[in-house]
Image (cartoon, rainbow, N blue to C red):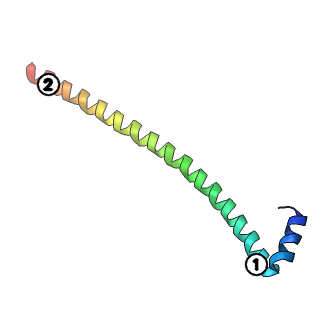
Amino acid sequence: MDLQAVVQLIGNVGFPIALCLILLQTLLVKFNKQMDGLEKRLAQLDKTMNLMVKTFHQSTSKAANRQDKKEDS
């Protein structure tokens, strides 16, 4: 927001309301950045959890195959 826009905003709505609007805009921008970061971290967590589940299923199926082979012997 440039200086001219701020001055015009103050002239139109008054200083306290203009200040509240500027602070609200700043908070919303920061909030959106934090939400974007959170979304990226959740996507990474989802990938990691899927990999862990896949690895777990592979290891349990290998263990079951070994158990079957031992029982056949």
What element does badge 1 sit on?
helix
Amino acid type for the residue under numbered disc 2: Asp
Q: Which residue in the structure is indicated by mark 1? A: 17
Closer to the camera, 32 or 18?
18
Q: Quadrant of residue 71?
A: top left
Q: Characterize the local packing of mark 1: few (<14), some (14-19) or many (20 or more) Cα atoms within 10 angstroms.
A: few
Q: Is residue 68 left or right of residue 38?
A: left
Q: CA distance from mark 1 to mark 2?
A: 75 Å
Whole-percent x, y for residue 33 in the image: 65, 55
Instruction: Give residue 65's quadrant in the image.
Output: top left
Q: Tell me if mark 2 has few (under 14), some (14-19) or many (20+) residues whose alpha carbon lies within 10 angstroms of its own.
A: few
State which quadrant residue 17 falls in.
bottom right
Mark 1 or mark 2: whose residue is earlier in sequence = 1
Read off the residue under disc 2. 68
Q: In the image, what residue occupies the spot 45% across and 40% down? A: 48
Residue 42 percent coordinates (x, y): 50, 48
Residue at the extreme left of the image, as rendered:
72
Q: Nearer the viewer, residue 53 or 17?
A: 17
The answer to whether 41 is drawn above or below residue 50 in the figure is below
Quarter placement of the C terminus: top left
Q: Residue furthest front?
A: 12
Label 1 sits on what residue type? Answer: Ile
Of residues 65 and 50, the one nearer the viewer is 50
Label 2: state its secondary structure.
helix
Q: Position of residue 25 (x, y in %)?
A: 71, 65
Q: Does residue 3 lie above or below 14 as drawn? A: above
